[in-house]
Amino acid sequence: MIRRLFLLTLPALLFLSCLNSDDENCSDLCPRLGVLAFDVLLDGNNVFDNGTYSINDVTVDDENTQFSLESISSPILLVQDPDWSEGSFNYFIRLSDEHSFTVNATFEFSQATECCSPIPVLTAIRINDINQEVPLTDGVATVNL
């Protein structure tokens, strides 16, 4: 019983000690697992904004990959994969049966700190075999179908 209590309280104590330290709040310092964000255009128009496609038309070839639409000024396709680690990841993203694009994203682990474990950080990205600048402008890659 004491062993089980110790195993349950140790992580909580470590977390609380970090929060109560004189240093900044650890949760504010740690980066979160990122997303890949795409502004998907056809003939210069965002395909989600003009109603050409909806989130229901999107499929990604990796079943662990999660995707959604986020609307800032226009809808952006967000892709996140819980399997991201150091290395390259390839995705085939289909919009209905009419359009598709390929993404090759390369990640490296960030530096570990006193409070934070390393997380995968995007270091290179190719869309339809065209290299994109990293970091991406406003964190969003433009895809021209």
Image (spheres, grey):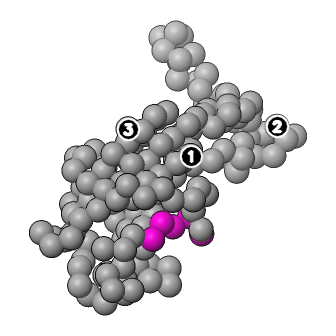
Relative image position of residue 130 (x, y in whole percent): 43, 58
The CA span between labels 1 and 3 is: 16 Å
The residue that disc 3 covers is 83
Q: Is residue 97 magenta?
A: no
Instruction: Using residue 37 as the reference point, say whether residue 52 is left or right of it.
Output: left
> For the view shown, which residue lies furthest in the bottom direction?
50
- In magenta, the rendered stretch is 138-142
- Tell me if mark 2 has few (under 14), some (14-19) or many (20+) residues whose alpha carbon lies within 10 angstroms of its own: few
The residue that disc 1 covers is 123
2 vs 3, front mark: 3
Task: Provide the major secondary structure of the magenta segment.
Answer: strand
**Amino acid of disc 3:** Asp
Instruction: Using residue 103 as the reference point, say whether residue 56 is left or right of it.
Output: left
Instruction: Using residue 36 as the reference point, say whether residue 121 is left or right of it.
Output: right
Dots 1 and 3: beta carbons under 8 Å? no
Dots 2 and 3: beta carbons under 8 Å? no
1 vs 3, front mark: 1
